[in-house]
Image (cartoon, grey):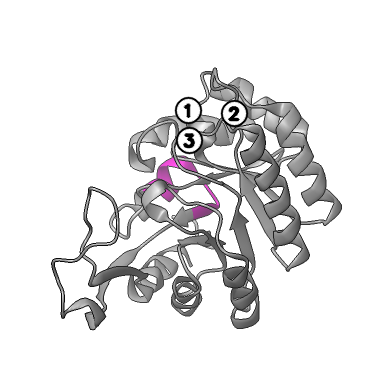
Amino acid sequence: MAKNIYLEVCCESVEDAIEAQLGGAQRVELNSSMFFGGLTPSLGSLVQAKKKLDIPVIVMIRPRGGGFCYTAVEYDIMLQDTKLALDYGADGIVFGILKPDGTIDVERSMKIITMTRQADKDIVFHRAFDVTPDPFKALEHLIEMGVDRILTSGQENSVPEGIPHIKKFIDKAGDRIEIMPGGGIKQSNVALVIEQTGTKIIHIAAFKTMEDHSCRNRPKVTFGGCLYPPENQYSLIDRNVIKAVSDICH
């Protein structure tokens, strides 16, 4: 298996990003609310991440979960968040905007692309790509638009399921755009993904469950929605898993 695979780690917090770097990540994607697939992180998180990390920090620009076709207000927020992220040191912007029919919203996307290109930072189109009706047409559009990288699970629920499509995307893209497999990659399957897709880059997340005992006095009290996640638990990137994956990649 080829080595020197670039390792990007998906993070929900600055603590995650620190653990990812300690585990061998070469870049982090900073988010909030991974329960929704990743939303825009706070500006404070970006500022602290840039202070504490020596590796690039790519910032998610996504104002809400539940699809990728945004209202005028949500889109204005995305533009403002993009400007602020770039002003405060983001090394790249991750975003995805679709029309109601699932095709790429070229006009809206170009405003974010132009802002990011003017700042000379990375432009990444996220897994909104995976729900486009014609991924090869979408691929060509993103190349024409000047996007640097596409995050994809091969239009399947996970990368292992999408390997055949990812291989086709990589072959079709050539050196015109970078195809980055992400979604469901684990220590147990990363070697297979690399071998069967021919990718030179992977995007992973590896969380472990931590406990916060400050809620122990009233365990029946909850603060969230109807799913009621345990109030004494939270997730943190597992640096040991990241290190194991990094060793496989290098």
| Residue linked to disc 1 | 131
Alpha-carbon span between mark 2 and mark 3? 20 Å
**198 part of magenta stretch:** yes
| Residue linked to disc 2 | 98
Task: Look at discs 2 and 3 and give the one toward the viewer.
Answer: 2
Specify which label sits upstream in the sequence, 2 or 3. 2
Specify which label sits upstream in the sequence, 1 or 2. 2
The residue at the point 38 percent across, 32 percent down is 156
| Residue linked to disc 3 | 166
Question: Measured from the top left, where is residue 197 in percent x and y?
Answer: 46, 41
Which range is magenta?
193-202
Specify which label sits upstream in the sequence, 1 or 3. 1
Marks 1/2 in contact by CB < 8 Å: the verdict is yes
Give the image quarter of residue 76.
top right
Q: What residue type is labelled 2?
A: Leu
The residue at the point 52 percent across, 60 percent down is 8
